[in-house]
Amino acid sequence: MNYDLIIVGGGAAGFFTAINVAENAPKLKIAILERSKEVLSKVRISGGGRCNVTHAEFIPNELSKNYPRGEKELRGPFHTFMTGDTMEWFDRRGIELKIEDDGRVFPASDSSATIINCFLSEAKRYGIEVLKNHAVKSFCPKNTYWNIQTSQGEFITKKLMIATGSNPKIWKQLEGLEHRTIAAVPSLFTFNSKDPRIVNLPGVVVNATVKVAGSKLSSKGPLLITHWGMSGPAILKLSAWGAIELEERAYTFEIIVNWLKEYSQQEIFEELIVLKNQYSKQQLYTYTQFDLPKRLWQSLVLASGIKNNTRWADTNKVQLRTLSEELTQGKFQIKGKSTFKEEFVTAGGVDLKEINFKTFESKKHQNLYFAGEVLNIDAITGGFNFQNAWTGAFIAAQAIISG
Ligand SMILES: Cc1cc2nc3c(=O)[nH]c(=O)nc-3n(C[C@H](O)[C@H](O)[C@H](O)COP(=O)(O)OP(=O)(O)OC[C@H]3O[C@@H](n4cnc5c(N)ncnc54)[C@H](O)[C@@H]3O)c2cc1C
């Protein structure tokens, strides 16, 4: 079977490539080969079933800062296709999107089925062949064509797009074609901790600064205490930026939490002395300070060796210094990680040095393109991973049409 373009992988990047090529080059014969019996499975479960399609950050250089791997390489591509283009793309197809307060963009229907139906109906409209249960076993260049072996026989194509997400078997295949790949490690996870200071506080959220001890890793933002440890944007950012370093440490390390974001220990100590004079007759434990959630304040007071009936006037300097330390430099041992809302995102994939980011074509082989998670690109949570898929797919589609 002969094609102009074969796309391996019926996921976000695969469909976006196929539709953008077909829209502008309707005569090309295009097929998507998908190993499973369903296409777009990850889109279906994404964003808790709502599909967080992108993030409302409209400055390319700012957008690229959300990619621990791919930041530098995506800066240029984002000048060609980014958030606003994604929103317009869906708008042109009658899909209404909405921006939530935190910048995440979802279909107004709050259902990933809206996005899936859009892709499926566009594929049908343009005559793209969607071949399910076609697992690609191998592919290699032959003269000016690509030869593809699948579970259902052989295919021939002029241009080949690999959009297989994080499939190690495909990375192995690519190594056989002299492409370097970076081994996959988890990139978006929460931290496990059984520390008694937080064990009874699930649900508490604080705007904090978190640092990994003995490392340059640091982040700011909401920290959510969970039943098993810590999560929230501050932790997820660290997990993404520290994916490789934390894996090397076998997910066993110490973090330092400043529950008061940026205040130094000395500043807080001095403030505690002021409070001591101001509220001398009150019990410390009873009234929270610094706008901290009351349960967290009480836990940190007890952790500082101050009893729940101690009055401010009866505290000594050592206790207040310890409390200021707990508030601004709390040390927590992390042992292990957990998956964030089943969102398995991995660092790793095809080495970015081997990709031409003006076309998303391989520098090693002509007519071989990549988009989405198959590349060594990943982002923090919030719609950025899909934006990478849309951007790569769109630019590759342009190159495929004009090449
Ligand atoms: C639970 C969950 C929730 C998520 N939510 C969000 C979100 O809301 N927003 C966001 O931005 N990101 C989210 N992500 C990340 C996002 O889903 C991925 O970054 C994105 O799907 C990557 O698209 P892709 O097309 O590169 O890969 P995939 O979507 O993984 O698609 C790859 C396709 O290739 C097929 N394939 C693999 N190997 C072969 C083969 N040998 N032959 C044929 N076919 C093959 C696979 O079956 C699959 O269908 C989420 C991830 C998960 C797991």
Image: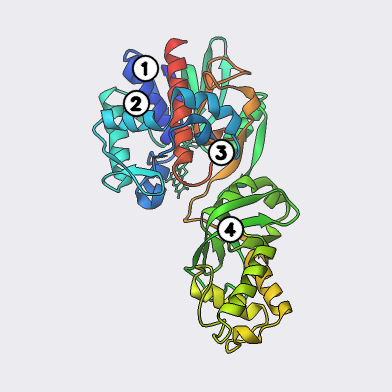
**Quarter of the image where one finds residue 170:** top right
The residue under label 1 is which amino acid type?
Lys
Q: CA distance from mark 4 to mark 1?
A: 56 Å
Residue placed most toward the observer, 307 or 181: 307
Does mark 3 have its CB less than 8 Å from ligand 1?
no
Which of disc 2 and disc 4 is earlier in sequence?
2
Q: Give x and y (percent) for residue 22.
A: 34, 19
Q: Residue at x 57, y 44 (%)?
A: 346
Q: Are marks 3 and 1 in contact (CB under 8 Å)?
A: no
Which of disc 1 and disc 2 is earlier in sequence?
1
Which of disc 1 and disc 3 is earlier in sequence?
1
Which of disc 4 and disc 3 is earlier in sequence?
3
Q: Are marks 4 and 2 in contact (CB under 8 Å)?
A: no
Say which of marks 3 and 4 sits in front: 4
Q: Which residue is mark 1?
A: 29
Residue placed most toward the observer, 107 or 205: 205
Dot 1 alpha-carbon crowd within 10 angstroms: few under 14, some 14 to 19, many 20 or more = some
Q: Give x and y (percent) for residue 358.
A: 53, 18
Q: Which residue is mark 2?
A: 129
The residue under label 2 is which amino acid type?
Glu
Q: Give x and y (percent) for residue 203.
A: 47, 68
Q: CA distance from mark 2 to mark 1?
A: 8 Å
The residue under label 3 is which amino acid type?
Tyr
Which of disc 3 and disc 2 is earlier in sequence?
3
Mark number, residue 261? 4
Q: Is 360 situated above or below 10?
A: above
Q: Residue at x 47, y 10 (%)?
A: 403
Mark number, residue 67? 3
The residue under label 4 is which amino acid type?
Lys
Q: Residue at x 66, y 74 (%)?
A: 323
Q: Secondary structure at mark 4?
A: loop
Q: Residue at x 61, y 79 (%)?
A: 276
